[in-house]
Amino acid sequence: AQSVTQPDIHITVSEGASLELRCNYSYGATPYLFWYVQSPGQGLQLLLKYFSGDTLVQGIKGFEAEFKRSQSSFNLRKPSVHWSDAAEYFCAVGVIKAAGNKLTFGGGTRVLVKP
Amino acid sequence: NAGVTQTPKFRVLKTGQSMTLLCAQDMNHEYMYWYRQDPGMGLRLIHYSVGEGTTAKGEVPDGYNVSRLKKQNFLLGLESAAPSQTSVYFCASIRGGSHLRDRGRNTEAFFGQGTRLTVV
């Protein structure tokens, strides 16, 4: 069965500093990878996704992520954090099975932004 | 397009009461899901449906029932609410299908805004 691990539960970063959120997955076949963001009291919004091709993918709000098959990782990055980036971030792996397509989430990383 | 709509947005229940959460999607998606979100535990799958008239159990199905009588609607029921069911519930839909060309898109999920349920 597939699984997703986000090793960092909380990260605090200063406004203007760079941010990197780690995501490791376990899945035997081709993974379809996603990052979602959840602002306080809100639903989940898709930041970016990796299906195939270029391993560096660009998303909304200035985020990017790099797929590294050898490390089973899909880390999210942003060069310069804004106060509005304070939120919880979820990495997910999508799989296609005969019994139905599924999305498995990591436990999430909460990002706090210091002024 | 409204996307995925959940009702209600907030609810307080007394222990032992019952209620139904409604999820509606207007994207003609095949697959629908109910997750619960609890602090530090991410999103855990309760039940899901791969098509009209079908349902299946997820990771944490106990205490919940679901129905998918119409393709666009997925209902989550709590027959006898317990304080342990205090949570935020999210519905999601996925287009579904396994056509090779669209495989990645067939796993992209669209979420509702959530229902915050408190059981006292």
Image (spheres, coloured by chain):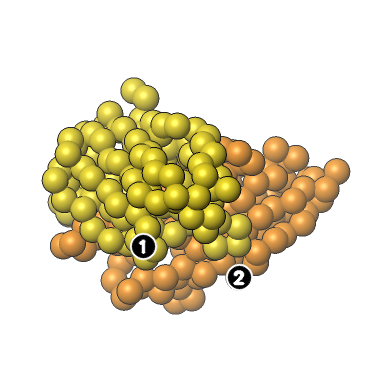
Which x, y percent locates residue B2? 37, 25
* Dot label at residue B120: none
Residue at 54%, 55% in the rendered image: B83
| Chain with orange colouring | A
Q: Can residue B103 be seen in this view?
A: no
Residue at 34%, 36% in the rendered image: B23
Residue at 30%, 66% in the rendered image: A30
Q: Establish whether labels 1 and 2 are both on one chain.
A: no
Circle 1 — which element?
loop
Q: Is residue A74 above or below residue B80?
A: below
Q: What residue would you read off at disc 1? A: B62
> In screen coordinates, is B79 left or right of A63?
left
Q: Which chain letter goes with mark 2? A: A
Q: How many numbered markers are drawn?
A: 2
Q: Which of marks 1 and 2 is in front?
A: 1
Q: Is residue A42 visible?
A: yes
**Neighbours of disc 1 within 10 Å: few (<14), some (14-19), many (20+):** few
Looking at this view, name the residue that lies furthest to the right.
Answer: A115
* Dot label at residue A7: 2
| Kind of residue indicated by mark 1 | Asp
| Kind of residue indicated by mark 2 | Pro
Q: Quadrant of the N terminus of chain B?
A: top left
Circle 2 — which element?
loop
Tell me where residue A85 sits by quadrant.
top right
Q: Nearer the viewer, residue B45 or A31?
A: B45
Q: Please name the color used to draw chain B.
A: yellow
